Image: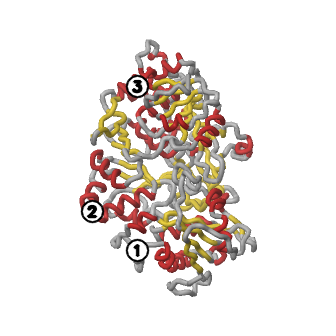
Amino acid sequence: MQYLESDKKLGKTTPNIALMLERNSLRFSERAVYCEKLNGKYSGITWEKFFENIQNIAANLREHGFCKGEKMVIYSPNRLEMLEMELAVMSSGGISVPIFAWFNAETSEQLIRHSDARFLAVAGELQLSRINPEIPLKEIFSFDRINTKQFKNLHSFEELLKPNNNKNNSLNFDAGEDEICLNMYTSGTMGVPKCVQLTHGNILSQQAGLELIWNLNENDRFLSYLPWHHSFGGIFERFTALYTGATMYLESGYGKDPKVILENWELVQPTLFFSVPKVYQSLVELTKADSKAEETFFHSGLKFVFTAAAPLPKNISDEFEKRDIPVIEGWGLTETSPCCTLTDPNIKRENGVVGKPIPGVTVRIAEDGEIQVKGPNVMKGYYKNEEANKNIFTNDGWYCTGDVGEITPSGLKLISRKDRIFKLTNGEKVVPTEMEGLIQTKCHYVMYAMVVGGGSEYPVAILFPNKKMLDHPNYEISPEEGCFCPRSINDLGKCLQGCLHDANCGLAQKFSKIKYAMVIDDDLSIEKNTLTPSMKIAPKKVMEAYKAHIENLYGANNKISEDVYVIKLDTENKISRKPVEV
């Protein structure tokens, strides 16, 4: 087997979150830990007041019967109250269970019941309206004031902030590194979300490792939108800010509107930014059309930008590179708290390469190509899921990630999710993510691409357009020569003929080349379950939702309601760039 580890050794780590919070409340007492935007300006809370609130919350929760080992489901978007509640729970011996703020009633009930939590915190009326009163909850707390007689056990969060004489004894400073403090549900890209059990040591060992790599401190500013129910935002970004004493500024648009992000960017002037490729793409596109936006975004104090979830397109990465702003990419999973590897900003970025392990973490490649991980960041296991736990660790204790990769001189290279690889009728294995990446690199008018074909003679692709870009094409930012900035599904279909041909040419194996593709005039969404809460495509759900469309690409004649454009490709690569009518 091939092994890869950091050349830096992990030293002593802070044992638990309570000690980390106490340390920083003393070191940075008058500095802001967190800020929110109000009336066009950002204002925040100091470390001293923040720590006092956490102590009071923990003490008052105890009087409501919240004991060590109890679980609190937190059903809310990012906000100060959520941050304080979650840290009070985790640092007092409890287990926080954050869930996506906009889950429907059915999903939220499923997760609350599965978690066995007896306590619940909701943001406000919307979340409370989705709670079944029959769920056996001891107490419910609302961050917003709500007047209702439906829930007799409902309390205002303000009650928990009241001064408590026992606040100095409310936190568990003796908690061990192996004690579970966080239950986080996975995105569920391939099915039902799994409940990952994470410890103080899982979370803080990662920060001790990052401290050896990154030069961050209390003067840094994070402009944050990544949701805290998800590991990228809730563990990696948030605890990086908390651990170093940097200030977190909540992005008031929650990352949904690039114009709002830029407005907040000008106010905050972040020194680093954590995001996903789709958001970087939208922000860079704005700067292309506005010199002031360009100056604001690429400001001199920006140390680096961090990207994860998918490779950053080269044309976007190049915009940072030519301004000497490092782009760092990382890889990991919720089960690994989440970061395992980081790219070195001093090394030229390579497509698919996600760098080398952080201190304390080792990765290896199994005989079947699966990436396996060992380190203090690896979870205890899944909660109440014997089937998932059965084969998740090897006999010698390595975590099986489900990702397939290889080790290169530049670091770990990702190839695909193991369960995405499929076999054709001739027995050949196809790695669909390779083609999907090529398509999305070629055309930024494609929002999502999915290649399928298990048990068939050849692969096909279903493509979902970026409708905002179709409505407002920008003729200055087309990445490919010959792109005429399509304005409709038909335009895009005709234009894609050439790009898909080129993408096919980029594949070495003839059997991996797609024969047909379909552009579908529809949106993938969280509400339809075709996207996860972290905005990643959910392959199984997409295949279910567009089963009729996929069958039509193999010769069926199913009736479908959406407008589509079908593209036929010559896998021998002999065709020209002219569209082929089907």
Can you tell which quarter of the image residue 34 is in?
top left
Distance (Cα) linking label 3 and label 1: 52 Å
Instruction: Specify few, some or many for label 1: CA neighbours under 10 Å numbering under 14, 14-19, or 20 or more.
Output: some
Name the residue that disc number 1 marks.
Answer: 485
Which residue occupies 49% across, 60% down? 311
Circles 1 and 2 in contact, beta carbons < 8 Å: no
Circle on res. 427: none
Circle on res. 290: 2
User: Which amino acid, mark 3?
Assistant: Phe
Circles 2 and 3 in contact, beta carbons < 8 Å: no
User: Which amino acid, mark 1?
Assistant: Cys
Circle on res. 51: 3
Residue at disc 3, secondary structure: helix
User: Which amino acid, mark 2?
Assistant: Asp
- The spot of residue 199 in percent (x, y) is 57, 34
Q: Is residue 354 visible?
A: yes
Q: Earlier in the sequence, mark 2 or mark 3?
A: 3
Quadrant where the image shows the C terminus:
bottom right
